[in-house]
């Protein structure tokens, strides 16, 4: 036996509908979202169900065939792309896309890994519920991927990361066994919580095949506004005011810096400043409730007007209708796209303790500019979670000097983040892109413990090898 | 070298203030809360800090001395008590009881394992925050223990289990290394989440020494009421109504059955029925908000009066002040104590999908009564979480037949729970008490995976051996 015969056996098992081997059709599975990473694979395996996947993984284990699980392939760190060597089998979960059950009494839904996030959002909505995970890739991202990467996005502030939304999991482990724990219980203290080990493991400890997820009451009213503010400290004060008065309804508290908003207005058709066009920062705030009778708008106005009186705000607008709300959201949501249109960039997905964000920017901005005077720092992000996309636009140069400069800036940023007990990857994960930095900035004890775990689950290193670890 | 010399070395390291070896003083550390379990230990080791604990655990590893970590020793499944053989060293975290930092901007607090839960609640309150974990043992339970057992209680419905409150952890691993991850970040996707492996591991994978925990805005108003209802189905409908109208403020949704409430009224001085004295079930509901301006009482009354019109409720009272609210709470909180006063009992800490609770009781009550006609079934619990303390009063007999009957009832209950995808231990854990049942009712794949994890972390099986696993 060999990898070659194992692959033949897998092809036979899958049948023609379960195999993609035409180079053109394979291409989208082999290149990452931002085109940063590209790999090769013998073929794309598309199992029909969990039992079939279990059989495939048993063959892979026996024949030592490395496996790369893939969902919607929307990750930003190359975690779902095979290596260039061509020996890693891409296993796409996209055919396993059934919503198995929706329980309105328990407010839970059981879905397969290949369900697209937006499909789940829509199905939940039809049943009178909210599935809150939301991010710009939701039209393509699949639930299995959002679990394996512990996806974040704009609703984490209120509802938590994907981790907090998972009640039960079903997964195929590296030895091909099926771990079936699709429970819908908020309380279950029967031994180690194995679900949490698989959430955020980036497919290196097993393949998530289905999950039981929390649903929430559908929001029947939302109030969205944007405030122009003078500083990150003022944003934090405003955040504190909203938490004190209406923490329960606070669905979003996002920030966009003036440089980032200027790029949005420049590159995105129809985008314009919400109010003052020269405030250092803009904060997008949303309140939402399932109850139609709550005076959310009054609450919003009361907090904003008091903050204005106290000099915490420069200006504020509140959307009068859903179109205006969508316009405010699109300013924030298009920040990443606007920076991309401006030219080459450098992206950071950091998080910091809330109390440290202002100090971080005050200290790090000058260090970055000293290293690269022509750079434009244009941060934005989920400031209520401490998660800043500390992104930058670079001069359009591909010189060796620029490559050195980028390296130097990464060192500056990650070293400051680490000093302040922040994270070098708040929501995007490690994948291929950040594994060198993980080694540098994660504690040796944590790294050694992670390796023990990997070794225990996957002693042959066949599950998504080369991701997270070398 | 040997265990004996290792223990001498540990005594020396700890000094006299770190050792308890007087039999009378040792006693409280050797008997479990409900006197169900008792053990022996060479002495009680009380390390002064994490570094000292690390040194102790290194000696234990070298000399193969088994270790039993202990917090407030309030667990209900014997998880913190050493074995009767006397070779297991009890390590009490009680001296490590500092609140290291409280960050009001980030709304997080960093505490050592030995801090008593109530102390933390009080300190949070003084700073204007709520630390929501709440349970009857809060005056003795220590934070390290609540983390290692993933404690639940009455506030899980709104704020989650202890697991959901932990942002960062510091722990001494079985090899004595210190895992230091006291981060306060809601978003941190840098590799495997090791914190979650230690939460709920009952001290079998390492010893939690400190944690960074979430705080919430202090509730400046609460509304508490109790409704008399005809059935569990009606309770679920009422729960649905409260979620639809004020999910954001719903702090408690607890149930107490008529037999349980009758025992409370019988045994607890001052306790009396809140309204009708013959309803099959009573539901305790609490709304709370940080905002003083929210019309919580109006909301409560509106939901209750609509439910009354629709025939979902038999009767309801709303507390007029905090004394009345406390009286309603004490009916629920004294249920366990009232059953204990009635005589010998049989306790279950199960959870079920919300949609299955009514069916479970309808099917299981008759099966239990058929097996033991003289038994009194008196359930109560956290019904909003699906967590029922399905407790029973037994006739006062200690015959062999009674022991067989208890065994039979356990089989009936756990088998029904398992069929309905419930949990045989919702919040109390496994410890010694439920490890035989864990083996019977947990899936073989899950058990094998748990063992792999244990083996990877603690290959010598020195951390709380005999707990969770044989």
Image: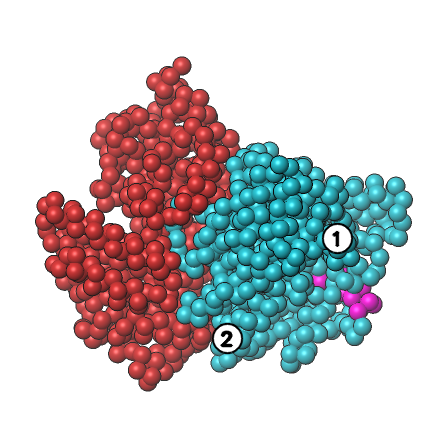
Chain colours: A cyan, B red
Q: Earlier in the sequence, mark 1 or mark 2?
A: 1
Instruction: Report the residue marked by disc 1.
Output: A31
Q: Which residues are magenta?
A: A256-268
Q: Is residue A413 above or below residue B132?
A: above
Locate residue A52, reporting x and y percent: 55, 53
Q: How many marks?
A: 2
Same-chain status of marks 1 and 2: yes
Compared across the picture, whether B97 is left or right of B437 comes to right
* Quarter placement of the C terminus of chain B: top left
Residue sitting at x 81%, y 48% = A369
In the depicted view, which residue is nearer to us: B381 or B460? B460
Q: Is residue A123 above or below residue A174?
A: below
Locate residue B50, reporting x and y percent: 47, 33
Instruction: Report the residue marked by disc 2.
Output: A128
In the depicted view, which residue is nearer to us: B248 or A49? A49
Q: Is residue A449 magenta?
A: no
Which chain does the numbered disc 1 sit on? A
Compared across the picture, whether A384 is left or right of B23 comes to right
Residue sitting at x 62%, y 48% = A10
Residue sitting at x 71%, y 59% = A380
Q: Is residue B46 visible?
A: no
Q: Main secondary structure of the magenta part?
A: helix
In the depicted view, which residue is nearer to us: A264 or B395? B395
Locate residue A205, reporting x and y percent: 56, 44
Q: Residue furthest top?
A: B1
Q: Is residue B66 visible?
A: yes
Q: Secondary structure at mark 1?
A: loop
Locate residue B125, reporting x and y percent: 42, 56
């Amino acid at each position: 036996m060999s990898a070659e015969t194992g692959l033949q056996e897998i092809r036979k098992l899958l049948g023609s509908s379960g195999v993609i081997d035409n180079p053109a059709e394979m291409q989208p599975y082999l290149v990452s979202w931002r085109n940063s990473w590209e790999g090769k694979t013998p073929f794309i395996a598309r199992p029909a169900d969990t039992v079939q996947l279990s059989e495939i993984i048993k063959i892979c284990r026996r024949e030592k065939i490395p496996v790369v699980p893939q969902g919607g392939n929307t990750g930003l760190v190359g975690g779902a792309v095979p290596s260039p060597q061509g020996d890693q089998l891409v296993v796409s979960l996209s055919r396993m896309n059934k919503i198995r059950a929706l329980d309105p009494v328990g407010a839970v839904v059981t879905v397969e890994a290949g369900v697209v996030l937006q499909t789940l959002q829509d199905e939940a909505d039809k049943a009178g519920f909210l599935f809150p995970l939301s991010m710009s890739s939701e039209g393509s991202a699949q639930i299995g991927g959002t679990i394996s990467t512990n996806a974040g996005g704009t609703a984490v502030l209120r509802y938590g990361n994907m981790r907090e939304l998972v009640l039960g999991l079903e997964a195929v482990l590296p030895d091909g066994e099926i771990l079936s724990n699709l429970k819908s219980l908020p309380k279950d203290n029967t031994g180690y919580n194995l679900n949490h080990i698989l959430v955020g493991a980036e497919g290196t400890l097993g393949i998530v095949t289905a999950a039981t997820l929390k649903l929430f009451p559908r929001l029947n009213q939302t109030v969205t506004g944007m405030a122009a503010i003078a500083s990150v400290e003022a944003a934090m004060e405003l955040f504190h005011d909203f938490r004190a008065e209406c923490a329960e309804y606070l669905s979003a508290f996002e920030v966009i810096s003036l440089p980032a908003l200027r790029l949005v207005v420049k590159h995105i058709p129809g985008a314009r400043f919400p109010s003052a066009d020269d405030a250092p920062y803009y904060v997008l705030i949303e309140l939402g409730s399932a109850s139609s009778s709550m005076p959310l708008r009054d609450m919003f106005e009361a907090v904003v007007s008091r903050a204005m009186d106290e000099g915490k705000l420069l200006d504020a607008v509140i959307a009068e209708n859903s179109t205006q709300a969508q316009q405010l959201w699109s300013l924030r949501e298009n920040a990443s796209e606007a920076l991309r249109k401006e030219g080459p960039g450098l992206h950071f997905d950091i998080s910091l303790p809330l109390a440290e964000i202002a100090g971080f920017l005050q200290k790090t901005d000058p260090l970055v500019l000293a290293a690269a005077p022509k750079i434009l720092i244009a941060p934005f992000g989920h400031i209520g979670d401490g998660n800043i996309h500390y992104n930058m636009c670079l001069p359009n140069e591909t010189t060796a000097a620029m490559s050195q400069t980028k390296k130097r800036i990464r060192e500056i940023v990650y070293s400051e983040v680490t000093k302040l007990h922040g994270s070098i990857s708040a929501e995007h994960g490690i994948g291929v892109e950040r594994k060198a930095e993980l080694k540098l900035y994660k504690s040796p004890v944590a790294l050694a413990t992670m390796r023990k775990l990997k070794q225990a689950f996957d002693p042959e290193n066949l599950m998504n090898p080369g991701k997270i670890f070398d």
